[in-house]
Amino acid sequence: MNIDGLRGKLHPNRDLSGLTWLQVGGPADYLFQPADIEDLSHMLRSLDPSVPVFPMGVGSNLIVRDGGLRALVIRLGRGFNAIEVEGDTVTAGAAALDGHVARKAADAGIDLTFLRTIPGSIGGAVRMNAGCYGSYMADVFQSATVVLRSGEVVTLRGEDLKFAYRQSDLPECAVLVSAVLRGPKGDPEALHARMEEQLAKRDATQPTKDRSAGSTFRNPAGFSSTGQADDVHDLKAWKVIDDAGMRGARRGAAQMSEKHSNFLINTGGASAADLEGLGEDVRKKVYANSGITLEWEIMRVGDPLSK
């Protein structure tokens, strides 16, 4: 690939395993880290239209298969992680970590506390309509700046993205570069205290010290846990996995966590095939036990390893 005038870093045949939280996966044909939005627009505008584009965040909710990815992978870095607060709105670069955005918003008395315990960055949070404790990105989203596959820079609003549970209609191959969020006002001290409570609860119930990718499957009920005392669990993914006897299930070095059965973990040396295969084992067992078909929340991309 030879495109004149690029200022970012272009890496051919770049191994992706070290860029995902599960630490698995083969190489991408190319990995591009743009210097800024103009550099990104130039790359997409100049790129052969037949080349697939895959925007990659911090790899927190992703399995790259062992054979790698036949695409140009775009990973946003320091030029895309600014967080700015004005009034009751927060403008965050797509590479800004969810937890950092929540903390900076709280400093300014803006309640985006639900983001504090969500792994990943703002770009992925918008794409997946991330949420917890009864709040979702759709509730606070105002607009996003997006670079289309053509290189055109556009502004998209909530009605354009058609948010639903764990999904949005972001255009194919488009790269989200920043989002404007608006949250309710709150007392900074109280907001920070709430986030500390949420972190403590997360660490007590989830395998945060293990190599995982967050929740593996979407809740069949179609909504996140609220964290409230009256929350019901019958149609939570972890509950139907438990009922099917798959807590702690293994395939090679892949395991469904003993601590939280909706967390798929790499205990050391698992392949992408091990992890995805165990997930499919779980889906089959849950369907056989309850008739419920679990839907993946973790994105799986790329090709299996050729035999």
Image (cartoon, helix red, strand yellow):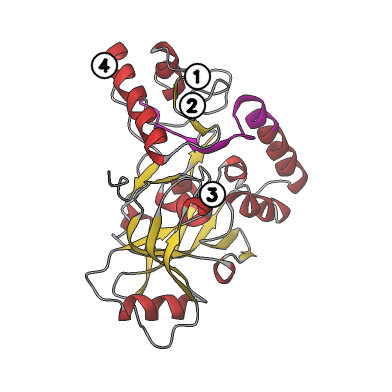
Q: Earlier in the sequence, mark 4 or mark 2?
A: 2
Camera-side mark, 4 or 2: 2
Residue at position x 38%, y 46% from top?
Answer: 66
Q: Magenta span covers which residues?
A: 200-220
Q: Which residue is mark 4?
A: 291
Residue at the image position 77 percent from the left and 44 percent from the top: 189
Q: Earlier in the sequence, mark 1 or mark 4?
A: 1
Q: Which residue matches tag 2?
A: 255
Image location of residue 228, percent across then percent down: 57, 24
Of the two numbered discs 1 and 2 on the same chain, state the one appearing first in sequence: 1
Residue at the (48%, 18%) spot, across then down: 247
Real-space Cα separation, disc 4 to disc 2, in angstroms: 23 Å
* Magenta stretch holds residue 303: no
Tag 3 secondary structure: loop
Q: Earlier in the sequence, mark 3 or mark 2?
A: 3
Q: Nearer the viewer, mark 1 or mark 3?
A: 1
Find disc 1 in the rendering and name its residue: 248
Nearer to us: label 3 or label 2:
2
